[in-house]
Amino acid sequence: MQVHAQRFYTAGPSDIAGLEAAVADGTIPPDRIVAIIGKTEGNGGTNDFTRELATVALAQLFARHTGETRAEIEDRVVLSFSGGTEGVTAPHMLVLWQSGEALAEPAADKRLAMAVGYTRAFSAAETGYSAMVEETARVVRELMAQARIEAPEDVHLVQVKGAIPAYAPEEADAAIAAGRPLRSDMVHSRGASALGVGVALGEVDAARVTDDAICRDWSLHSGVASTSAKPGLQRSEIVLFGNSRWWDGDLRIAHGVMQDIIDLPAIRGVLDALDLPCPDGQLAPESGDRLIGVFAKSDADYRHRIRGRRHTMITDDDISDMRYSRCVVAAQLAGVTGETAIYVSTRAEHHGPPGGGPVAMIARCA
Amino acid sequence: MQVHAQRFYTAGPSDIAGLEAAVADGTIPPDRIVAIIGKTEGNGGTNDFTRELATVALAQLFARHTGETRAEIEDRVVLSFSGGTEGVTAPHMLVLWQSGEALAEPAADKRLAMAVGYTRAFSAAETGYSAMVEETARVVRELMAQARIEAPEDVHLVQVKGAIPAYAPEEADAAIAAGRPLRSDMVHSRGASALGVGVALGEVDAARVTDDAICRDWSLHSGVASTSAKPGLQRSEIVLFGNSRWWDGDLRIAHGVMQDIIDLPAIRGVLDALDLPCPDGQLAPESGDRLIGVFAKSDADYRHRIRGRRHTMITDDDISDMRYSRCVVAAQLAGVTGETAIYVSTRAEHHGPPGGGPVAMIARCA
Amino acid sequence: MQVHAQRFYTAGPSDIAGLEAAVADGTIPPDRIVAIIGKTEGNGGTNDFTRELATVALAQLFARHTGETRAEIEDRVVLSFSGGTEGVTAPHMLVLWQSGEALAEPAADKRLAMAVGYTRAFSAAETGYSAMVEETARVVRELMAQARIEAPEDVHLVQVKGAIPAYAPEEADAAIAAGRPLRSDMVHSRGASALGVGVALGEVDAARVTDDAICRDWSLHSGVASTSAKPGLQRSEIVLFGNSRWWDGDLRIAHGVMQDIIDLPAIRGVLDALDLPCPDGQLAPESGDRLIGVFAKSDADYRHRIRGRRHTMITDDDISDMRYSRCVVAAQLAGVTGETAIYVSTRAEHHGPPGGGPVAMIARCA
Amino acid sequence: MQVHAQRFYTAGPSDIAGLEAAVADGTIPPDRIVAIIGKTEGNGGTNDFTRELATVALAQLFARHTGETRAEIEDRVVLSFSGGTEGVTAPHMLVLWQSGEALAEPAADKRLAMAVGYTRAFSAAETGYSAMVEETARVVRELMAQARIEAPEDVHLVQVKGAIPAYAPEEADAAIAAGRPLRSDMVHSRGASALGVGVALGEVDAARVTDDAICRDWSLHSGVASTSAKPGLQRSEIVLFGNSRWWDGDLRIAHGVMQDIIDLPAIRGVLDALDLPCPDGQLAPESGDRLIGVFAKSDADYRHRIRGRRHTMITDDDISDMRYSRCVVAAQLAGVTGETAIYVSTRAEHHGPPGGGPVAMIARCA
């Protein structure tokens, strides 16, 4: 069993020509595609319609080749588009598919393994509370087993598209009256999902993850979570990546945690772990082709400081701090790797320390 | 004779408290200040009033301490504020002053040397044409001699605030009719200034700098120029920095040229030249205090490509590519140096190759 | 023969639910739809993908109901989406369809008439030059005849999506060398289209429309043109609206020209022409239902002045003057009509005097 | 005793040339100036430094002419600058000064009267709570008496710059623990100030203004308040305008309340009250000179609807809804009055109904 990954640079959110050609010539079997992760050139906010446009275009592609409806595709394949290609970021999509059968016995070396799953549906009252953390943790553990990843240290990236169930205004009022206001919002959904990942992998002590601690005690965080949230989503979608001796192929994954937004050494550490050398500070071009995917979470430190110095990302009312922080992290990743197809998504509650965030990379073995 | 430099982090464009204190306690003699170079938190565009606010505040400071008027100060001291502290950039100002006398004979080691001067006044018809290139080159050579910098290779940064004389509409019409349209605009003023620097230092072949080549033949460029332009300015102001054996003190300067906007190795090269080590990819904290000033020019490649991959900085109609390119370059400089008081200014016509640009740093000797 | 029009308020660029229902219940015959004109909530600029998303959604609707492909639909139906719902503007689409047969003889009263057509394909060298003006004028006259509109005064709105043929860099260089630089750009395409409308209807003296006058002599303008331009389009698409005694139904159209961006009396004049009373300054609610479509062109006066007073729409580098001018004109139209489904598109070269622009409205007869 | 007012159009935030000339030639006595109300071309947000720049320039003017320090001026003269000249708004300042003595007995006609005052200092715990409402109401009543305005109906504009005392984090934590979280923020300060005005003038029933109702029960509102808030301000500054038979001069004031953001009839009502005719929908040019000041509050309706139709001002993550709402209201005011020197400030908690807001105008008598 192996994971394959191919990166396509796109000319616009609806550009699926590269994937179309790869499907047409048999390189990529559309029915074995498990995830498509991409950056589109929107603003990443409420009025970003580029993600929908990309999804519609891909749904049409699948309809042509597998006959599946858009709903079926959204159910079977993880479509994870993040709007915002600030600065150097090249719009692109990474297509992941699987082939082969499970190994009869473990190999000597670990290779990229993955699994996809879903939590149960959440009620609005559970979202952003401990119940969401626990259920997320349960599924993460299940996916780890399913992917036959033996140790938590072998998990390097857990992407969660978190649930945000809709609710009636009366439900919100009743919750306030009951002293337990709804947290069915982006911030709490992302935060609870990230803590769920952290609890499952032992990064976070489950006993400390009380309702009060969620989105408040920032000393609790995961270094491999990458969570978003989607209004209207009932259950969370989870893709887990790690390395396992039960998978073959030639891909591996590693991660690190930026302790603040200029923690370039953390980026270098990930490349080191993948045996990707950086003479002169940048990945040598001859090794560049080995780097397949770069994923990071970013945030402008809410304390308005980086290493004690003032930053103005949050006080700039003309440009969102989300756009700045994505731009900053992508620039450093591109500077170190020489590659601009970087997936940085923003808002990183309980993802690494405040102002920092996880970085993961998938690379071909030398 | 030596150059001193002190960096002040500011709480806002009008924050001069740090300098005020340093003047009050005698650390910095206000009458020996020759240049103040800073970043303020505006947008760097037409409606950026933060530079004016900083200038007004500084003029009041000088008025209190030296009795000079604002006009006298703007004439004597180079006030170079660049709006736009995108991303990680910390608003700050670097104050440069001089002390001591010229050395009787050259020392063994070169130290930071500088000189300030002005071109003659330009007519609108000359601006952006060869006449501006030549006069700029003449003054650059003069300043080099004045600073007793012996070789062009020892010049590492030439900041020019370029003239843009006003003109009457009739003058513009007459110029078009005569087949030689006015170039009294930001683009051509910056471009001609940069070529003037390049010609003076032998980076650019004077014979190739025809009127047609200005802002068209991008193969011509300087690696040490840093030019801006100011509508209404009659003559260009020039500050030249280099290393000379005729100066003492403990500062040195070096530079490099980013070949594209993600040329992190070029940044590393400058640190190497200043003996500033980067174990793990970032300047070690214990060496960080030695780094006094970081200056760069940025631009989003007009060909919409970085190493063959698409970037969207120019096609984003919500955020100016100027803000993006400053953010990108500052992020990489901060990532490598660990310092966020970075001076990046944008629009880099004939400053290094298209999409790239010069980087200079001033550091204390070990 | 009559024109029918129905307005649908949309919940997003891809929201076609209203039209879908109207088609499903037989209210609107999809094969008789001739134009869909709408506002989507993008920025109206290069990176506005909302128009594409709306088009894709409509193409899927037609595919389901008429079996036509997207190319067939884009060829048969004028899809005119303008991005940018600044300020009060409600995202919406206006669907226009036809029914019935040509009248045997003219009626006593004029009713809304329309015709759709195309210019021949333009070369890049023709675009923005007199050739484009002339061909546009020819088609406008043809459409007038086709719609059986007897007098130029009865034409009230001519929407043109203007051609901008692609070209090779060598073609551009050759054109410059030949002293006739290409004008295959948005500005010149829109300007030439508008002048074509003006020439056809006698608003502009054809003799004065020299190549030099295009996008330079702003005293030449049409009061009924509404032109845009689309890179890659080979031929211009034209929809002409007017009143004719050869059409029946209950719709009528009228127009006026704002002399500057605050010419509210011009707006009032259009309502007067349609017998829509404004007691207290605003269309009375009981008459509001009669107003079906409101169309305008906007521009921030390039002279930075409105009635002698400074405006800052152009010097604001944070927000495009296009967004401001649309917001301003829509606000006034909404203030006078009480309706927020307003179609304002921007950039109005040769559309009314500089800083002003045409306003047209379609209303049901009392 | 009379109030004089003169409007100056400005070329930039620091442009005080007009006032300087008027002071120099004796037209305006600087020591009798009581208020300067203006619009500057910033973004009206956290990083808007245009207000500070205007204040610094005015302080220098006063220093030259009256010898007062900036602190003295800020204490004696109400300097009320609002950033954001969106759309048609002309940057300008309105200077108000007084002359003469109190009338011995009331005149037949009422004329513009005004008074300036301050609340006591607030603690952080009081801000945004009933205590602030009550103290504001007390001072408003006092100013009404001081200005000899006899009936609440004669008060037409009460500008409040509301206090926002600083506080220690511990104070905030203790307040949360005590079940009474601090409201020392912009929203609550503005809201409490507006309710204070409403209570003083009988617009709002004091009994209904409980702590819970502040910034929650939007059915409570004032039609003459115009409140802002300033972090760090200890006491609120209040300027009250009305008409009184105890004042002479030739100025009068009137107001109306826009029930939603497109309530143009409310604007017309204010002009009617001042006998300013609008043939064709716009104030006739010959009457235009009589209009001296136009003041309004704006807000994008938080329910995302205007008369049942969707607006996108709040879901647009590229441009702040504050900028949109100011642009919209200013456009309509300019359309009706023909004047672009309009003072619209945004965020209008408890100022008229949600989505609407007060409009006041000062005009010369015919």
Image (cartoon, coloured by chain):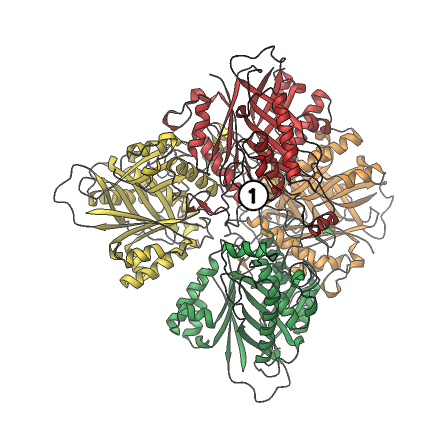
Chain colours: A green, B orange, C yellow, D red
Neighbours of disc 1 within 10 Å: few (<14), some (14-19), many (20+): some
> Residue B58: image x %, image y %?
73, 35
Question: Residue at the front extreme?
Answer: D207
Out of C185 and A125, give the one closest to the viewer: A125
Which residue in the structure is indicated by mark 1? B187
Judge whether D294 appears above or below A19 on screen.
above
Q: Quadrant of residue B332?
A: bottom right
Check the picture and name the quadrant holding the N terminus of chain D: top right
Outermost residue, left side: C104
Q: Chain of mark 1?
A: B
Whether residue C260 is visible here, answered yes or no, is yes
Residue A222: image quadrant is bottom right
Query: Total label count?
Result: 1
Residue A309 is situated, as x and y percent measured from the top left of the image, at: 73, 51
Residue D237 appears at what percent x and percent y? Answer: 65, 31
Instruction: Tell me where residue C30 appears, x and y as whole percent.
Output: 27, 57
Q: Is residue D13 visible?
A: no
Asked whether C332 or A201 is in front, the reply is A201
User: Which residue sits furthest bottom?
Assistant: A104
Relative to C215, say whether D97 is above or below: above
- Helix, strand or loop for disc 1: helix
The amino acid type of the residue labelled 1 equals: Val
**Left or right: where does residue D186 sit relative to residue A7?**
right
Q: Does A43 sit above or below residue C260? A: below
Q: Depth check: B129 or C24 in front?
A: C24
Closest to the observer, B111 or D39: D39
